[in-house]
């Protein structure tokens, strides 16, 4: 199930901003522009920054768009997120990425039900199915990644302790 249409744009803006902030060169270029020093002369910086539709070439910021992004990110951090964002229909193919995604899903499940709880396989499957279509893959990957521990008989699961 896809993300609700009214979330697509704010989430896209947030993803783009986070991606740019993770690259030092782009982070410096964005800071330069926001400080009023004009756009960077470097085409590798200027190109990506020109795609920010909430940021004008002169550094003016569309506050309404950023407010919407902030509100959407706040909602995504809340318990409402499960109601607003659809399931993942696919998990990354690379096992390292798959384990990372699966581990995050398992952590979210246990954040919601309580980190100290032990879940039966059926309970865990039901909780995972709210996030991902391939429940068995997520469960196995989370165990393989060391995020979950499984009882010897495979009937129950717990969040692994650090």
Image (cartoon, rainbow, N blue to C red):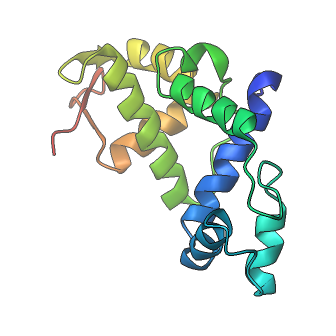
Q: Judge from the rendering whether residue 148 lies leftward or rightward of residue 90; answer left or right.
A: left
Give residue 45's position: percent from left, percent from top. 73, 78
Q: Nearer the viewer, residue 97 or 51?
A: 51
5 over 55 or under it: above or below: above
Is residue 132 in sight in this rendering? no
- Residue furthest to the front in view is 36
28 w.r.t. 57: above or below? below
Where does the N terminus fall, quadrant-wise?
top right
In this rendering, position of residue 104 left or right of residue 117: right
Q: What is the quadrant of residue 90 in the picture?
A: top right
User: Which quarter of the figure has residue 9?
Assistant: top right
Image height of 112 relative to 65, above or below:
above
Residue visible at 32% across and 14% down in the picture: 113
Q: In this view of the protein, which residue sits in the foreground, 146 or 9? A: 9
Q: Identify whether 113 is placed above or below 48.
A: above
Residue 104: image x %, image y %? 43, 40
- On the question of residue 81 being in view, the answer is yes
Frontmost residue, 108 versus 4: 4
Picture residue at 40% right of the left edge, 12% below the top: 123
Q: Residue at x 63, y 51 (%)?
A: 92
Q: Position of residue 19 (x, y in %)?
A: 62, 60
Q: Position of residue 64 (x, y in %)?
A: 73, 33
Q: How many marks?
A: 0
Relative to 5, 116 lies left or right: left
Which sits in the foreground, 4 or 154? 4
Question: Which residue lies at the image location 68% right of the left edge and 68% below the top edge?
Answer: 33
């Amino acid at each position: 199930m896809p993300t609700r249409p009214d979330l697509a744009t704010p989430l896209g803006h947030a993803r783009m901003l986070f991606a740019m902030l993770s690259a030092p060169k782009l982070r410096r270029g964005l800071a330069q522009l926001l400080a009023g020093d004009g756009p960077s002369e470097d085409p590798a910086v200027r190109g990506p920054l020109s795609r920010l539709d909430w940021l004008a070439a002169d550094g003016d910021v569309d506050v309404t768009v950023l407010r919407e992004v902030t509100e959407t990110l706040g909602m995504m951090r809340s318990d409402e997120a499960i109601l607003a964002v659809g399931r993942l229909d696919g998990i990354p193919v690379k096992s390292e990425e798959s384990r990372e995604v699966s581990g995050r899903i398992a952590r979210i499940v246990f954040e919601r039900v309580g980190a100290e709880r032990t879940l039966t396989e059926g309970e865990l499957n039901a909780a995972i199915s709210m996030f991902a279509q391939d429940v068995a893959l997520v469960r196995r990957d989370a165990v393989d990644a060391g995020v979950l521990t499984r009882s010897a008989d495979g009937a129950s699961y717990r969040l692994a302790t650090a």
